[in-house]
Image (tube, rainbow, N blue to C red):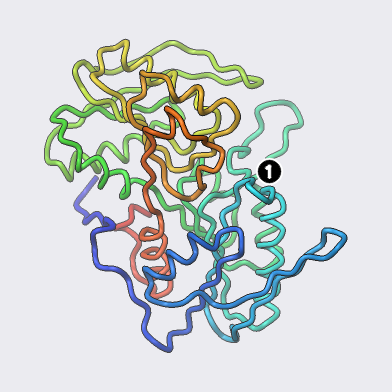
């Protein structure tokens, strides 16, 4: 990996100087996370208005002055609990347009969870490449940069946008979590070959922090028309705590398959580390599988779909606000993002 200093949430909180030309907004659907980011930055959220009309149309406008300022807008684009991903995307785009019209020097969209990031290539004849269409909408409204966390395919995401993009990884958060584990023998598992680079970045970083070898393994998975197949498991997890790393949880099937495969291969216990917990229908039942000991997600998507029960009892939620605050501070001040593992 080369020499680097990994940032962790234990590091000093970033602070923005009084009178600085930075403005931070959070739209209503992401107020809680936006407020947490503002607290880490040591500044208040700026005031804005969101208004609903009888026919379902809406508007949003800044109430604080944004002229000649660098404006950051936080909006996580997951569906629910009260609005769809489409609605949240539309509101974010309209608000960015309003900020540009109000004289903002730059507008940076901070999107903890980016909708449509999984549809980044054609897998069937005449398939859409929706990630590219979403990028075109951000660019058309005048967005200067997009900051997001753990997209499905970072290369496809970066290639889709012509404006600047910052693709954060949850690795610093997961490394801090894993560093607290007492286990001597750890092995990082990718639940499919497509996530191998994500898993290897996490494994290499954790190995550098712990100063001892960390094993690696991967499970085979092939998805077609919603059907998942593949039984191959490669790697030695005998007697180890297997850390299954992935970008998101939808129904939980991928993680459960990987957990069962790791157990069958001799893993002592299995912990899943995923950035975004969507927890779609059936996830609570699937993830209650005893093959999976702990489930770790960030708060980019609140677990509102996950009822009380076995799965909720083994869920750990990591706050993402420190990571986003650090990224915003560094981006605004023109400092390197390398310590956040952004290259």
Q: Where is 127 relative to 259, above or below?
A: below
User: Residue 243 or 236: which is nearer the viewer?
Assistant: 243
Q: How many labels sit on residues?
A: 1
Residue 343 seen anywhere in this rendered image of the structure? no
User: Residue 339 or 266: which is nearer the viewer?
Assistant: 266
> Where does the C terminus fall, quadrant-wise?
bottom left
Residue 112 seen anywhere in this rendered image of the structure? yes
> Where does the N terminus fall, quadrant-wise?
top left
Q: Secondary structure at mark 1?
A: helix
Identify the residue at image location x=51%, y=47%.
Answer: 302
Asked if residue 89 lies left or right of residue 34, the reply is right
Identify the residue at image location x=66%, y=20%.
Answer: 225
Residue 143 x/y as whole percent: 62, 66
In this view, the residue farthest toward the bottom is: 19
Residue 23 x/y as whole percent: 51, 78
The residue where tag 1 is placed is 130
Identify the residue at image location x=42%, y=27%.
Answer: 310
Q: Where is 138 relative to 171, above or below?
A: below
Crowd tier of the residue under label 1, counting other residues whose Cα lies within 10 Å: few below 14, some 14–19, many 20 or above: some
Residue 212 x/y as whole percent: 12, 35
Asked if residue 113 lies left or right of residue 200, the reply is right
Q: Where is 101 relative to 154, above or below?
A: below
Q: Where is 250 relative to 144, above or below?
A: above
Residue 92 x/y as whole percent: 65, 62
In this view, the residue farthest toward the front is: 308
Asked if residue 284 lies left or right of residue 239, the reply is right
Identify the residue at image location x=45%, y=25%.
Answer: 287
The picture quadrant where one finds residue 274 is top left
């Amino acid at each position: 990996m080369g020499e680097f200093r990994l940032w962790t949430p234990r590091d000093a909180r970033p602070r923005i100087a009084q009178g600085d030309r930075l403005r931070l907004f959070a739209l209503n659907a992401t107020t809680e996370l936006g407020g947490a980011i503002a607290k880490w930055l040591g500044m208040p959220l700026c005031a804005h208005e969101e208004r609903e009309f009888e026919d379902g149309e809406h508007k949003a406008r800044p109430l604080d002055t944004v002229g000649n300022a660098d404006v950051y807008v936080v909006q996580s684009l997951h569906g629910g609990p009260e609005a769809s991903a489409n609605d949240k995307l539309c509101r974010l785009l309209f608000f960015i347009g309003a900020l540009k019209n109000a004289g903002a020097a730059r507008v940076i969209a901070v999107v903890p969870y980016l909708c449509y990031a999984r549809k980044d290539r054609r897998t069937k004849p005449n398939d859409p490449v929706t990630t590219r269409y979403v990028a075109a909408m951000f660019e058309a409204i005048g967005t200067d940069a997009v900051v997001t966390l753990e997209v499905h395919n970072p290369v496809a995401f970066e290639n889709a946008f012509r404006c600047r993009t910052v693709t954060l990884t949850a690795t610093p958060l997961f490394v801090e979590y894993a560093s607290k584990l007492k286990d001597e023998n750890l092995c990082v598992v990718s639940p499919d070959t497509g996530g191998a680079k994500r898993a290897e970045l996490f494994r290499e970083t954790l190995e550098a922090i712990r100063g001892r070898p960390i094993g690696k393994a991967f499970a085979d998975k092939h998805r077609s028309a919603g059907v998942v197949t593949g039984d191959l498991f490669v790697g030695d997890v005998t007697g180890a705590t297997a850390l299954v790393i992935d970008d998101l949880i939808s129904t939980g099937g991928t993680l459960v398959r990987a957990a069962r495969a790791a157990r069958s291969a001799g893993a002592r216990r299995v912990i899943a580390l995923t950035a975004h917990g969507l927890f779609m229908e059936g996830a609570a039942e699937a993830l209650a599988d005893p093959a999976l000991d702990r489930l770790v997600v960030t708060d980019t998507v609140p677990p509102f779909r996950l009822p009380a029960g076995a799965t909720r009892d083994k869920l750990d939620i990591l706050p993402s606000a420190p990571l986003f605050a650090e990224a915003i501070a560094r981006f605004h001040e023109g400092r390197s993002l390398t310590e956040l593992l952004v290259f």
